[in-house]
Image (cartoon, helix red, strand yellow):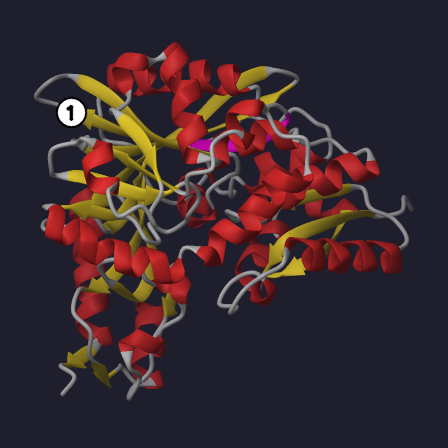
Amino acid sequence: MAKKKNVFVIGLDDFNLEKLERLPEAKECRFLPAVKFSEIRGVEDFSIPELLELTNKRIEEAGQIDAVVSYFDFPGSVLVPIIAEKYGLPGPSLKSVMRCEHKYCSRKAQHKVIPDNIPAFKAFDPFDDNAFEKIGFKPPFWIKPIKSYHSYLAYRIKNKTHFNECLEEVREHIDYISEPFSYIIKTYDMPENITENRNRMFAETPISGHQCTVEGYVYDHEVAIYGVIDSITEKEYPSFARYQYPSSHPYEVQYRMSDLARCVIKQIGLNDAAFNVEFFYNEEENEIYLLEINPRMSQSHATMFEHIHGISHHEVMLNLALNRRPKPLKHEGNHQVAAHFMHRVFEPGIVSNVADDKTIAGLRKKYPDMLLSINVKEGQDLDDIEEHHTDSYSYVLANLDIGAENEEELLDKYNDIVKHLNIQIKPKD
């Protein structure tokens, strides 16, 4: 019997381990934590040298490493190429990943090949008291960290007063991600357009429309697209209400998005990696605008792929890491449409009620393929919720994956589940 391959995972958690172990390739693999989820999320701070030391120790203890993967944003996305290079494994180059992760430099690369499909943008120093005037954009506009995730410290600016208020928050918290990100820039041989830019924030003009995400991969310098997902926001906030797959947009629009994704991925030089590219489609203008590039698969879409294809796109990520061309995804799932819902509230408060275990068990029996994760408990202050369940505007009370025959049935299921969860929030004194 052949010896199993050791696949080290950055950010290994129970949810993704279960997905990985259901893959056909799992019979030949052992999935081991290079870094555990609890070591990179919900922590007060993280040190890149300490994380690398930890991964090296675990790899040495295991005796061998055959592949390294991650489905998480920074620092998972940058640890993969560092480890892959050290051990001579398949994977993207650190430079190409950083061209995606450094949002301002990513915009510069995009501007070279698709200038009509991106907003105007400008980097700035959040500690500069004259930053608003130097940006020169008329509100509304967005400000974002050079590196962030889950819209952390991203704000849609209404006016100068609002800008200054947001900067107070930015100045207090920006070191959380920018310091370890800067360590990568200082320690490793980065392109000049990354090292020369010392600003930690950038501004860009608004883009609007229906948001979509293109999932794809690069194998042996060939770019392939295998899925387009609709990202549907709340009516009055930029926070996501749900991801829905497959996209409901016309194929012509999806093809245009896919072509733009191929163009920028080639320009950046990403190779042997999964990726997802977020777009806005403005139906009135019939224009497409690129929001951002992520050099990894999106784990938030995994259960939707299972509902439609019968297998998650973790298979794409794993095959790339094993130096194999990913196989085409077939329509072998139990549903025609699927969604990942985020049940949110937009005001702080105290959780005053959550459905009891009997009610939740009843829901699981009624919807056996439902995947439900409740993020709060009775008596909890929403301000104490784990940071990966929040953005600048809201709190995610529960995450929910379901499939259906059509969108109407999908929404009916969701509304029924939320009604029975009966999560209630009372205002803080």
Main SS type for the magenta part? Answer: strand
Q: Residue at x 51, y 24 (%)?
A: 193
Which amino acid does the dot numbered 1 rest on?
A: Asn
Residue 228 placement, left or right of 182? left
Which residue bears the numbered disc 1?
A: 282
Q: Please state the extent of the stretch shown in magenta in the rendering.
A: 272-276
Asked whether 319 or 53 is in front, the reply is 53
- Image coordinates of residue 64 in percent, x first then y, are 87, 48
Q: Can residue 275 be seen in this view?
A: yes
Q: Residue at x 63, y 59 (%)?
A: 47
Callout 1 crowding tier (Cα within 10 Å): few <14, some 14–19, many ≥20: some
Residue 428 placement, left or right of 41? left
Asked whether 20 or 260 is in front, the reply is 260
- Image coordinates of residue 65 in percent, x first then y, are 82, 46
The image quadrant that residue 61 belongs to is bottom right
Relative to 50, residue 222 above or below: above
Asked whether 354 or 114 is in front, the reply is 114
- Image coordinates of residue 414 in percent, x first then y, are 22, 59
Whether residue 207 is in magenta: the answer is: no
Asked whether 270 or 18 is in front, the reply is 270
- Image coordinates of residue 21 in percent, x first then y, are 64, 53
Q: Which residue is drawn at 30% across and 21% down?
A: 254
**In terms of secondary structure, where does tag 1 sit?**
strand
Whether residue 274 is in magenta: the answer is: yes
Q: Which residue is drawn at 70% across and 60% down?
A: 50
Total marks shown come to: 1
Quadrant of the drawing holding the C terminus? bottom left
Relative to 353, residue 291 above or below: above
Relative to 421, residue 244 above or below: above
In the displayed orientation, state which residue is furthest to the front.
129
Relative to 118, residue 160 above or below: below
Residue 177 placement, left or right of 233? right
